[in-house]
Image (spheres, grey):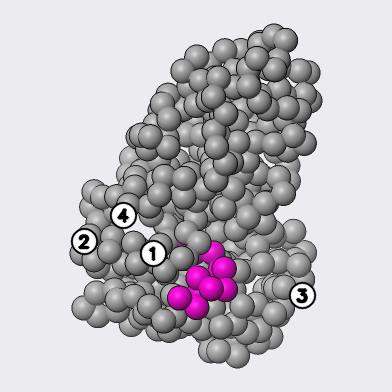
């Protein structure tokens, strides 16, 4: 199948000059050509004044979680396997409608995200899934209800080998406690590492030996530094939580930036509405801005699965980046090619180029001039198939 799609402009990659009055040719699900509309003999679909961008990416989601207060299963509650699978498919479909063509699931019980990834969705269009399946934690630790509890090196070895047998793309480790443990208050666990230095080094080396990169949930300086020194691939949250509130360690951040380690700060709809639990809003925003100013490679990820953090609110996380004054090309990059590189899909997703999968999103407006355009998705194509 061949289709030529035209629009007012096409942004092939966030750090490249947009092509005005442009068109994209798609052949058998992949991009065959992109350039000025005049270069094409005919156009099959004209999107008018829209801007076409690469399919966006959410690098931190929990697809089986119930993020609507009107639904029946809360984090920490057991749910039937069939319900979890249906929710994974439903959320992955909802992400497509928001212009997100790829997600990295960083915590789903019983390996079910991998099950859906491998077996499809019975014809329902859904975002591409990169999965870590069950997170690695300690007994009673953060997300233990859906994770693998490990309290020794032998436990960790078995868990990582189990992930390899499942076909997990990533290992997710709870390097610290968190702010949302449904079964008990985690107290000081938010402010200290859950694993020893030896255990963290083992997790990362064993995962890498089995072909899996590692994402670390890390809320405090000690856990951030521990995971970074051990060679983690992405740092999640990186809030530098402390009492009375979060405080960035600039020396450590500069090292993280110099090493090129990706950070997913999980900016989402909470930030500019209800706020975040680790600092007052103005402090949290200033801290995030400091990470950006020091050169950290920030990546878009919403922590979808928290109450009200639905797939349809993906764009609100990008509004947080706008709020701290990120360059708008960097915002688009955080949602596209940089996110693709961070999650291991740099050669496939995140940009529009010949030979790559045709993951295309049309916005009503130009996001490089008006970031609210991310809220106005009018067309979505994944792997050459129109979904919206």
Closer to us: 379 or 21: 21
Q: Nearer the viewer, mark 3 or mark 1?
A: 1
Magenta run includes residue 348: no
Q: Earlier in the sequence, mark 3 or mark 1?
A: 3
Q: Residue at x 27, y 64 (%)?
A: 286
> Of the numbered discs in the image, which one, if any, rests on residue 209?
3
The magenta segment is: 254-264
- Element carrying mark 3: helix
Whole-angstrom CA distance, mark 1 to mark 2, is 16 Å
> How much space separates mark 3 and mark 2, taking CA atoms?
42 Å
Within 10 Å of the Cα at label 3, are there few (<14), some (14-19), or many (20+) other Cα atoms?
Answer: few
Callout 2: few (<14), some (14-19), or many (20+) C-alpha neighbours within 10 Å? Answer: few
Eye-nearest disc, 1 or 2: 1
Q: Can the viewer see residue 227 in this picture?
A: no
Check the image and report above or below for 187 versus 358: below
Which one is nearer the viewer's eye here, 273 or 145? 273
Secondary structure found at label 4: loop
- Residue placed under numbered mark 4 in the picture: 324
Q: In which image quadrant can residue 219 be found?
A: bottom left
**243 with respect to 160 (left or right):** left
Residue 185's quadrant in the figure?
bottom left
Q: Which mark is residue 282?
A: 2
Q: Which residue is mark 1?
A: 293
């Amino acid at each position: 199948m061949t289709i030529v799609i035209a629009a007012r402009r096409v942004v092939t990659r966030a750090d490249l000059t947009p092509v005005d009055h442009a068109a994209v040719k798609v052949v058998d699900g992949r991009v065959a050509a992109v350039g000025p509309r005049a270069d094409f003999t005919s156009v099959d679909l004209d999107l008018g004044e829209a801007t076409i961008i690469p399919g966006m990416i959410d690098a931190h989601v929990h697809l089986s979680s119930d993020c609507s207060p009107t639904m029946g299963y809360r984090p920490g509650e057991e749910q039937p396997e069939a319900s979890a699978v249906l929710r994974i498919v439903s959320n992955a479909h909802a992400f497509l409608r928001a212009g997100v063509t790829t997600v990295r699931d960083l915590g789903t019980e019983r390996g079910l995200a991998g099950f859906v990834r491998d077996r499809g969705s019975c014809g329902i269009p859904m975002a591409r899934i990169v999965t870590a399946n069950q997170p690695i934690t300690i007994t009673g630790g953060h997300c233990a209800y859906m994770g693998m509890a490990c309290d020794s090196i032998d436990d960790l070895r078995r868990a990582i080998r189990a992930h390899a047998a499942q076909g997990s793309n990533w290992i997710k480790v709870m390097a610290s406690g968190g702010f949302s443990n449904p079964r008990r208050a985690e107290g000081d666990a938010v402010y200290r590492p859950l694993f020893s230095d030896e255990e963290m080094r083992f997790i990362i080396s064993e995962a890498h030996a089995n072909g899996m990169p590692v994402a670390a949930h890390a809320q405090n300086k000690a856990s951030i530094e521990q995971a970074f020194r051990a060679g983690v691939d992405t740092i999640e949250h990186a809030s530098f939580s402390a009492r009375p509130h979060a405080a960035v360690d600039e020396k450590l951040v500069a090292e993280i930036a110099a090493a090129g380690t990706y950070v997913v700060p999980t900016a989402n709809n909470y930030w500019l509405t209800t706020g975040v639990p680790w600092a007052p809003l103005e402090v949290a925003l200033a801290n995030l801005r400091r990470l950006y100013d020091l050169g950290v490679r920030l990546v878009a990820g919403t922590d979808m699965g928290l109450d009200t953090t639905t797939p349809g609110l993906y764009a609100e996380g990008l509004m947080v980046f706008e709020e701290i004054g990120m360059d708008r090309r960097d915002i688009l990059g955080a949602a596209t090619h940089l996110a693709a590189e961070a999650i291991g899909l740099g050669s496939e997703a995140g940009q529009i180029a010949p030979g790559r999968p045709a993951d295309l999103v049309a916005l009503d407006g130009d996001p490089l001039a008006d970031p609210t355009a991310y809220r106005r998705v009018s067309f979505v194509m994944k792997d050459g198939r129109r979904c919206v």
